[in-house]
Amino acid sequence: MKRRRFHILLLILLLLVAAVPLFTESRATINLLTHIFIIAIFAMSYDILLGYTGIISFGHALFFGSGAYTIGLLLKNLGRGLEIALLGLVMAMLLGLVVAFLIGTISLRVRDTYFAMMTLALGELFFIAAFKLRGLTGGEDGFSFRVPEMLQDRVVFYYLALLFLILVFYLLSLFISSPTGRVLQAIRENERRAQAIGYDVFRYKLFSTVVAGITASLAGALYGLQERFVSTSVLAVDKTLDALLMTIIGGSGTLYGAIVGSALVTIVHEWFSSLGSVHPIFERWLIIFGVVYIVVVLFFPGGLVRAFSSLGRRWRKDTRISTGVALSSEVVNVKEKESSC
């Protein structure tokens, strides 16, 4: 019953989001929502690592950046046909698969802090390579490219990004519900016990890294299509920290928490940036946002989605107790009346 109500609520929310372009022609609103859809895919890819496998990576941006550079270079050098864009999406995911496999094979041989430092070093290696290969990547200045005419229509691209978000959410939901996904969650809870039971922890972690890498590369390719521009900023550590922030604020290990976190962080980011003209203090919006982040981590350690779920469960429990007490009182009153008669 609860699952049915959740699906109905989700369907209503999707219909509302899908109807947005019918009620507004605001370019800024459509672009902002499209950006949220794409970044939500990126955050979900990070949630597979952090929320479901218990891996903290500081180099996740290299998958995002490799996807953006792949589709950008193809459209720049082979033309702006729709078939080239589709080829770019496929090639971005394939490159994500290969890079994730290689990096996972190298870095997953160490644990915890050493793994995080290893991914940070590999991410910086990709960043420096893109910076130095100016003839290919444009260096820090980056390069712009043209996209197919159909994708230049912001409403068409809005629905395309929404379609990819739904598709990725559905596929990742299947993945985490599968036996492999259950093993990953067991590894997250107690890696040594999972290993003692007989699971090949390294192989499962590598599989998780590959799934996360493919998803992040797809998000990067969609980001490149929306921006029509690629620079080394897509490979910066900031991108990884954004994904980490969104996952923690929304609620790691929930998938839809990553979507909520992406929407919240992106909207607050835009809001604080726009307030810069109101008062100079908002030009330092990153400091304010850092304080908000600390407050969320301190008071909602499981993320906003888990916090609201917990409040909902507590409210339903209190309601059941109140209803039970009221019914008991009513029964007692009826019995007293019967005995007096």
Image: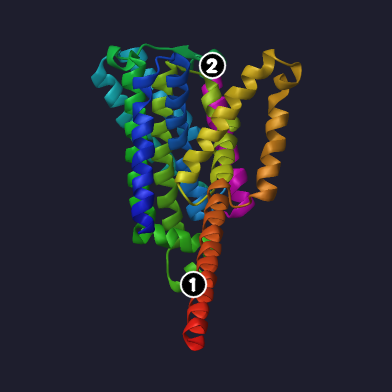
Disc 2 is placed on an element classified as helix
Left or right: where 113 falls relative to 332: right
Name the kind of residue labelled 1 in the image.
Leu
**Total numbered labels:** 2
Q: Which residues are magenta?
A: 110-131
Tell me: residue 156, above or below residue 341. above
Viewer-nearest residue: 123 or 184? 184
Mark 2 sits on what residue?
Answer: 139
Residue under pointer 1 = 327
Residue 318 appears anywhere in the view: yes
Type of amino acid under label 2: Gly
In the rendering, at what x and y percent does residue 292 appear? 68, 37
Q: Marks 1 and 2, Cα distance to the nearest angstrom? A: 72 Å
First in residue order: circle 1 vs circle 2: 2
The residue sitting at 54% across, 72% down in the picture is 325
Residue 109 seen by the camera: no
- Describe the element under mark 1 as helix, strand or loop: helix
